[in-house]
Amino acid sequence: MKCWILTIGMGLLVAASWGQQRRPNFLFIIVDDLRPQLGAYGHPDVKSPNIDRLAAEGLLFNRAYCNAPVCGASRASIFTGLRPLWPTRFTSFNTRIDKDSPNAVTLPELFRNYGYTTISNGKVFHQNTDTQEAWSEAPWRPHTLTAKMEAVNSQWVEPSSRNYVHTISGSGPYFECADVPDTAYFDGQVAEKAVQDIKRLAAANNPFFLAVGFIRPHLPFNAPKKYFDLYDQPEIATNRFSPANLPKECSGSGEILTYSKTDRYNSDDFHREARKAYYACVSYVDAQVGKLLDALNESGKAAQTVVVLIGDHGWHLGEHNFWGKHNVLENILHVPMIFKIPELKSKKIDRVVEYIDLYPTLCELAHIKSPQTLQGRSLLPLINGKSTGWKDLAFADWRGARQMTTDRYSFTEWYDEKSKDIYMLFDHKVDPGENRNVADDAAYKSVTNKLRKQLNDFYFSLKKKG
């Protein structure tokens, strides 16, 4: 029996506290592999007018961090409110909540228990069949990829892409620029379905939690040609070299090399081509976000709906010659997070926050009692300007690496038997690009010792609580 079950009396007390006021609706948008490379985050070279509009009207968190640098683990943590804990919980891209933490109540499941209509469109949980009791209706996706060659036939729509198939993985090109409408690809179909759901849910007049998951800019970078046409030759990373003193345990992802047409990998031309393709996918998803925001406004429910937009984790765009995720550097852990809460003025929040804080925050916004198992803290005090005592810390766990972000530093310790006494420390005040690991520098000895103790104390307490 799940520990989240509430008594009828408790439910009545919570409902009574609202009086005649309705609970807010929630439009929860999660974007795969989206880093804060957006206009709203100071990158005008990326065309993201709809996300920028949401940020201008809402709350933009400048220093939000994910708790795991891979899709499945990050999403499982977000929707259970539990931290990843290597090697037992939320450790890989194909993490399943119902396997790793079967007794946890997910955020949409809790909301459904309180009378919400909960809907999942697109890629929300990594596995579409995971924890289906969370949803009022079966989770919906445009198609399911069941075989390698089927992937070529479903994710790539340009006939010429069939001529480029990776001999080992069976995948097609790492990007595609087809002159097709938005709905030719996954995300356009997801947006179309979600727009119809907004209309349907608004007419039903019952509080709803609508989760919409877009898969771009995840590889392959496939988007309609009109979004590629927004860009000429983007500037490429200036730090295309390995950070000084980087441990071998911190490596790049080989994911992009499982696609074809990567024979010029890490050449100047490849860097420009790959950045342009990533940016095009961001603009494609931005257009889909705009459709949802417009539909919400037209439904008459915008004033009663909390909008949340996040990426599940960040991505390297050629920095250190890395492409992808799968490590605990800043470009992977730093993520976009934007709220629009009715009646709250727009502002930017510069304190360090983490995704583990999302679940309790949304519960408090809905006036729903949070499960006692949650390991984050509500962001509402911080949002309301009551920042005294805020933790200003974020933690990530990945393949034997425990990482902690503070207001100034990123500190990592590897703790498995093969990597004992390996540390990584970056001083973001003097080295925001993380180009030099200073963990062994004499000038930083006291900082390393202090942060190591703080990190180990945190994980000791976390394991103690379970």
Image: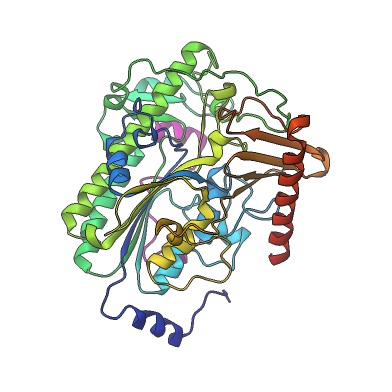
At a point 44% along the width and 86% down the height, the residue shown is 8
Q: Is residue 353 above or below residue 46?
A: below
Does the magenta run of residues contain 41?
no
Q: Quadrant of residue 434?
A: top right
Does the magenta run of residues contain 145?
yes
Position in image of residue 245 (x %, y %): 73, 25
At a point 51% along the width and 40% down the height, the residue shown is 334
Q: Is residue 241 visible?
A: yes
Q: Is residue 139 above or below residue 270?
A: below
In this view, which residue lies farthest toward the bottom?
9
At a point 38% along the width and 65% down the height, the residue shown is 365
Q: Which residues are magenta?
A: 130-157
Position in image of residue 180 (x %, y %): 26, 29
Decide if residue 298 is on the left or right side of residue 317.
left
At a point 25% along the width and 48% down the height, the residue shown is 293
Front one among 225 and 75 = 75
Q: Main secondary structure of the magenta part?
A: loop
Position in image of residue 275 (x %, y %): 43, 23
